[in-house]
Amino acid sequence: MDTFIFIIEIIGTIAFSVSGAMIGIEKKMDIFGISFLGLTTAVGGGIIRDLMIGSFPPKTFQNPVYAAVAIATAIVIFMLAYMQKLIYNTKFFNFMIFVMDSLGLGIFTVVGINTAYQTSHHFSNFLLVFVGVLTGVGGGVLRDMLAGNTPYIFVKHVYACASLAGAILCVYTIDALGMQGAMIFGAIVIVLIRFLSAYYKWNLPRIK
């Protein structure tokens, strides 16, 4: 189980770092800004999660591998763009940001649930779902605020609601599927909802 968690955390770290770095490129940031945005996107949600459940110091600072992977990923994206090996156009960038953000959202939502489940001795289903959603969306919110954008979760299709739906399904299938199975199921549901919402242009009601 520890190996499984580590592997999906690394995948999620890479995915969120790529999305952060690409937004940094879009905003014409330098290599430091792009690296910092990739790092913040990748580890921000986990830091907020750990502070909330009282896990000190946050996992990011206990094991620097996550920060190292995030920074290295962002630098690779910067170098590809710098050498013009990364196709830069709005349609491609938006699609890649969407894919990486959806993957990171799914992974970190269920990782947050597992962390809260393993850490707290007095957890409720509400706590697990809340921590899962907070972990999933936290890094993206910090990224968008630093980049000067309206946070993605408030304007782009079904985002936080996808995390919420996947988190609820994950929590309520732990007994039936086991933690690992529930995490895989929840993450798949989140990514699937994100892709369906983009394809069918599902959006929450808003005032026009």
Image (spheres, rainbow, N blue to C red):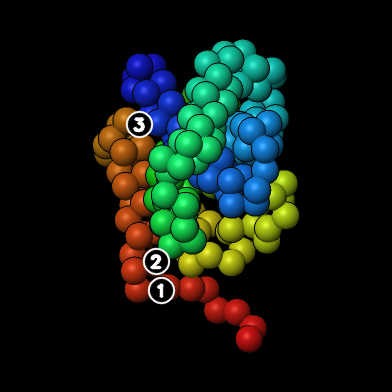
Tell me the amino acid under the disc marked 2: Ala
Sequence-first disc among 3 and 1 = 3
Q: Report the disc number at residue 198.
A: 2
Other residues around mark 3 within 10 Å, as few (<14) / some (14–19) / many (≥20):
some
Q: Quadrant of the N terminus?
A: top left
Q: Nearer the viewer, mark 3 or mark 1?
A: 1
Q: Which residue is mark 3?
A: 179
**Viewer-nearest residue: 123 or 148:** 148
Q: Give how far across and how far down residue 62 sits, in percent.
A: 61, 13
Residue drawn where x is 41% and y is 74% of the image = 201
Gap between marks 2 and 3 measured at Cα:
29 Å
Q: Report the disc number at residue 94.
A: none
Sequence-first disc among 2 and 3 = 3
Q: Is residue 18 visible?
A: no
**Mark 3: secondary structure:** helix
Residue drawn where x is 30% and y is 44% of the image = 185
**Viewer-nearest residue: 67 or 56:** 67
**Viewer-nearest residue: 5 or 52:** 5
Do residues under tags 2 and 3 come within 8 Å of each other at their CB atoms?
Answer: no
Q: Is residue 89 visible?
A: yes
Gap between marks 3 and 1 measured at Cα:
32 Å
Q: Give how far across and how far down residue 144 sits, in percent.
A: 65, 51
Do residues under tags 2 and 1 come within 8 Å of each other at their CB atoms?
Answer: yes
Residue drawn where x is 31% and y is 38% of the image = 184
Tell me the amino acid under the disc marked 1: Lys
Q: Which residue is mark 1?
A: 201
Other residues around mark 2 within 10 Å, as few (<14) / some (14–19) / many (≥20):
some
Residue 73 against residue 145 in the figure, above or below: above
